[in-house]
Image (cartoon, helix red, strand yellow):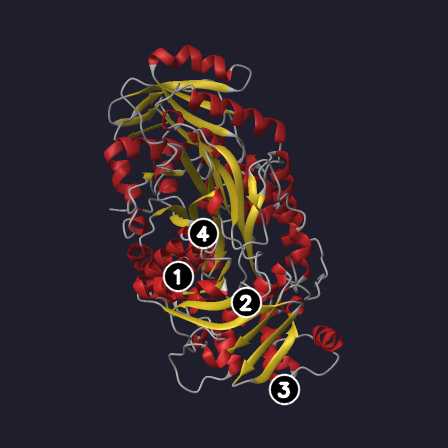
Amino acid sequence: MMDYRLAGLRQEEYEEIKRVLGREPNENELRIMGVMWSEHCSYKSTKHLLRNFPTTGEKVILGPGENAGVVDAGNGWGAAFKVESHNHPSAVAPYQGAATGVGGIIRDVLALGARPAASMDGLFFGDPENRRTQTLSQGIVEGVGGYGNPVGVPTVGGKTVYDSCYTDNPLVNAFNLGLVRLDQLVSSKTARPGLRVLILGSKTGRDGIAGAAFASAELSDDTKSSRPSIQIGDPFTEKLLIEACLELRDKKLIVSMQDMGAAGITSSSSEIAAKSGVGMILHFDKVPLREEGMTPWEIALSESQERMLLIVEPEDYDEVAAVASKWGLDCTDIGETIPGDQYTILWNSEVVAQMPASLIGDRCPSIHWPSKRPGDLEKRWEFDLEDLPMPEDFNKAVLDLVTSPSLRSRRWIYEQYDQMVQANTVQGPGAPVSVIRIKETGRLIAMTMESDPWKCYLDPYRGGAETVARSIRALAVAGATPLGLTDCLNFPSPEKPEQYWELEEVVHGMSDCCKNLECPVVSGNVSLYNESSTQRILPTPVVGTVGVIDSPDHYLRSGTWQEGDHLFLVGAMNAPLDGSQYLLQATGKTMGRPLPFTPEIETDFSLRALKTARQQLAHSGRPIAGGGLAAALVKEAVMTGLGAAMRMPFPTRMDVFLFGEGTPRALYAVPSDKVVQFRLVWNGFPFVELGQIGGNYLTLENIFDLPVPVLTERWEGR
């Protein structure tokens, strides 16, 4: 009898399995339960926390519990989207880890019957001067492009962060959004007894076996050698799989569908069974294999890529197989759905595993880890502005800031990605918000990815709220009404009380912000144990927020200054330096306390920003985020090739004015004939005219005077 601990199970989990089965589980069952009840698959440390998130709303069609969330994009169309982590695999095999992360999230969206239409990636790397970071970052970026480009889905945006805490544990968070007619949605909850269970796509091999368990442990020298746990991706097969699934959808041949991701056949089949309230009988000796001698448990847990599980009517099998053959894909009948809850695996007619489907997927006991407020929390907040010397040379201060690792241009990354395939990209990488069009309706879908691990470290509750609020501000400035968001919670081990407290607080902060700003969480992912024996990552929630723009005329771009435009700053004139990129650059420390979340101010800002875009009162709009006003000015100047002559509207401390962060603010370029209307829209909210756009110098009175060509050269890292 196999020791349950070798399967990764805790004693109380093993006892629960025995209680439900009424017997000792066999080795196949133990291995299956060990993976399905791993942290990666079961969310056992966080599922009680995730219930805090608001998940319903006027525009929510499908929330958490499906392969991805779906929101109503108008005119009978839906947007399906989700973000997922592929952190541990990318740390061990950067190219394949990142590539299969892209492939997996695409299949999650495809499983709902949506055509994958846009991808984004959240990449978190260590010290850029470190050789390991350089190797990992190059491999990861090549992996994202190496899969995303040939599969035919544009990579339109993302978020890239550098901090030494990610040296051992880089993070790769893959986002995908697909478009689907709401009357063509496919669900994983609609199976009935008497249907056939099919595998569509690639053959099954040993790659990725126990990948879910690998992703549920801290990285060590032992786990870093776990290359067999890394999946191998084939984007050309995935492209065929996409087209085959969509043709089957159009022909109404799919009753239910699930991607084979973590835990492979076991996860996909047991999830459909449990969600649909049916049982299954699966014949593993019928599964097409690409390696000889595979055992039932290896087949059960293989994470070979480019596979989907389909539930179809018995009489439709031949037509389904014909479509698969047309696209050059294997399509094999491996079983049937039955009444009840029994999940049975057969091998040459012999029962090798038999358990309730609900036990496999739904009944893993929650773990409520001890939680303790960090003893150094108030020390993290210690920051006295009076102790911070003013820069002697603001030209140098601005240049140093915008060329710092987390603020400089990402062109070297996104130029490796196909941004325009499918010909629907309106705004690709390099802007605060990415935008695609729905050709059939004329509407635009806007999306943005945000994260601020430094503020989440300083005050997890406020940092969590700020992360969500920042994404909603960006959408509002672009003219988009938020429809919902997806989140990926990247954290270190939950077994350490102070780290678990940070996780709890971030979730509460995000949840409260979502509730107040009416932006539901429709999907998401949790990645824990992102630490090694020598370092842990900062609390790193990543949010992908999606909105709709009713008309292309209501979309306000960034980086589109025009000569003679009036430059306006809206929002607080002085934002705090606490937790700012400038403070990190100037002192090498993350310190201070972010501002508290103020829903009334956030809502007021967003409503006025939406009016500005919809009334077409500006040529350009940019939310002010990392790096403060200075970074926003530089990015706008570089993108347009124009400078601006500005004056100080009032006496103030210049470093605070230029580099402060963490409050609703934006920079607008307003044509002369729209200035009066613009002022009326923002009347009652702080705003000030900074100056006028023109020439090729970015100048603020006697504070700084920078040639735009020099800014461009330095920011691009040439």
Residue at horizontal 48 percent and vertical 44 percent from the top: 183
Residue 483's label in the rendered image is: none
Marks 2 and 3: in contact by CB < 8 Å?
no
Q: Earlier in the sequence, mark 2 or mark 4?
A: 4
Marks 4 and 3: in contact by CB < 8 Å?
no
Q: Is 196 placed above or below 400 here?
A: below
Give the alpha-carbon distance from disc 2 to disc 4, as whole Å: 18 Å
Q: Mark 1 belongs to which amino acid? A: Ala
Look at mark 1 in the image and give the residue it sits on: 98
Look at mark 4 in the image and give the residue it sits on: 113
Give the alpha-carbon distance from disc 1 to disc 2, as whole Å: 25 Å
Of helix, strand and loop, which one carries label 1?
helix
Residues packed near mark 2 inside 10 Å, few (<14), some (14 to 19) or many (20 plus): many
Q: Earlier in the sequence, mark 1 or mark 2?
A: 1
Q: Earlier in the sequence, mark 1 or mark 3?
A: 3
Look at mark 2 in the image and give the residue it sits on: 269
Give the alpha-carbon distance from disc 3 to disc 2, as whole Å: 24 Å
Look at mark 3 in the image and give the residue it sits on: 2
Q: Is 30 placed above or below 495 here?
A: below
